[in-house]
Image: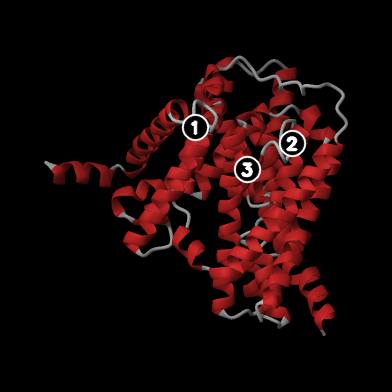
Amino acid sequence: MLDILEKAALHNGLVAAFALVGVIVLLSGQISRRLTFGRVHGSAIAIVIGLALAYWGGKVSGGHKGLADLSLFGGIGLMGGAMLRDFAIVATAFEVQATEARKAGLVGAVSLLLGTVLPFIVGACVARAFGYSDAVSMTTIGAGAVTYIVGPVTGAAIGASPDVMALSIATGLVKAIIVMVGTPIAARFLVLRTPRSAMVFGGLAGTVSGVSAGLAATDRKLVPYGALVATFHTGLGCLMGPSVLFFATKALIA
Amino acid sequence: MIIYGTALLATCHLLGIFLGDLLGQALGVKTNVGGVGIAMLLLIAARLFMQRREILPKLTELGVEYWGALYIPVVVAMAAQQDMVAALRGGPVAVLSAVTAVAVCAGVISAINRSERREEDPAPVPVLHDNPLLAEAE
């Protein structure tokens, strides 16, 4: 019996993932209503549960894709993978008020630039403080503080060592997780209320996964505005990391 | 037909990714530059264009909106496949640089957003359409 059930789930991975995520969302909705009286958004709880399951899956399987590495939950990898994630993000653009987005275009672009340069400087300085004092390592770890994709792309381009690359990816992952979990908590401090504020947030907070999950857990209506800016983040980071930022770092420490 | 909406979304998505790849290649980066963002802009433009010419029936809209409404479940699935173990194993350098970077950015976000002049207070809720799918998702 159990074997047959397991086989059914294995052969219908994506469908099983829909069912599993449905249960998680249902559960977190109940927790939100019953235990926190609606103070903590159901989506925020669902994302935290997702992250906890990712940790458990990573521990059990020893892989890098959290729950998706357990064959029974392989469908999670498809459902939460880049393809469907981007598809759903693009779909949210349907709700964007074009006038609002245009009004905040410039400030969005400025925050995008700041959101690349500031984390880079911080990351590079922390790396230096911990003894990674060569330009290549500082740049790679700094780029990791931009997003976990910019880090390895930059590192590969300028020839960083594998352990520095791993550190850079870890930095980006920790950042994404902090943004996911922290955004709903800090929403009041960040003044996340208007489309413009969401675009500023998307530019500065950076990581698409962090921004999209963080805004989803704060206010679903703000998601498209934040995501619109944040999706340019990785591109800009990969453009500036191995070039401008690397040369600047090299010039500064030489 | 509901598939028209989903096909429109898929076309915008593919076109955006394609343009993003082209842009990346033109700039000499080994990655996609803003493909998803370009796709979003294309979809916004397509919607405005089709609404103006009144060739956007409700069913077509639903084909897009369904996926927009599935967004949060997809994000939950995304969270469930993060490499949490590696993130937590990164040690003090990773944690410290990530925390500091987020803190600095949060300060700047807060400063910029506080400077936003408040024409209307409380801020008007962006007008959504009367779509029950999306009302649920909130």
In three-dimensional space, the C-alpha distance between marks 3 and 1, rounded to whole angstroms, equals 14 Å
In three-dimensional space, the C-alpha distance between marks 2 and 1, rounded to whole angstroms, equals 20 Å
Q: Say above or below: B132 vs A140.
A: above
**Mark found first going from the N terminus, 2 or 1:** 1
For this rendering, which residue is in front, B111 or A208?
A: B111
Lateral position of residue A52 relative to residue B41, left or right: left
For this rendering, which residue is in front, A24 or B43?
A: A24
Q: Which residue is mark 2?
A: A191
Does any portion of residue B11 appear in the rendered image?
no
How crowded pointer 3 is (Cα within 10 Å; few <14, some 14-19, many 20+) is rated as many
Query: Residue A62, how many percent across, how many down?
Result: 36, 65
**Residue drawn at the location 63% of the way across and 38% of the way down:** B12
| Chain where mark 1 sits | A
**Mark found first going from the N terminus, 3 or 2:** 3
* Amino acid type of the residue that numbered disc 2 sits on in the rendered structure: Val
* Amino acid type of the residue that numbered disc 1 sits on in the rendered structure: Gly
Q: Say above or below: B88 vs A107.
A: below
Q: Quadrant of the N terminus of chain A?
A: top left
Does any portion of residue B37 appear in the rendered image?
yes
For this rendering, which residue is in front, A11 or A237?
A: A237
**Residue drawn at the location 51% of the way across and 62% of the way down:** B87
Q: Which residue is mark 1?
A: A42
**Residue drawn at the location 72% of the way across and 40% of the way down:** A189
Q: Are marks 2 and 1 in contact (CB under 8 Å)?
A: no
Q: Which residue is mark 3?
A: A183
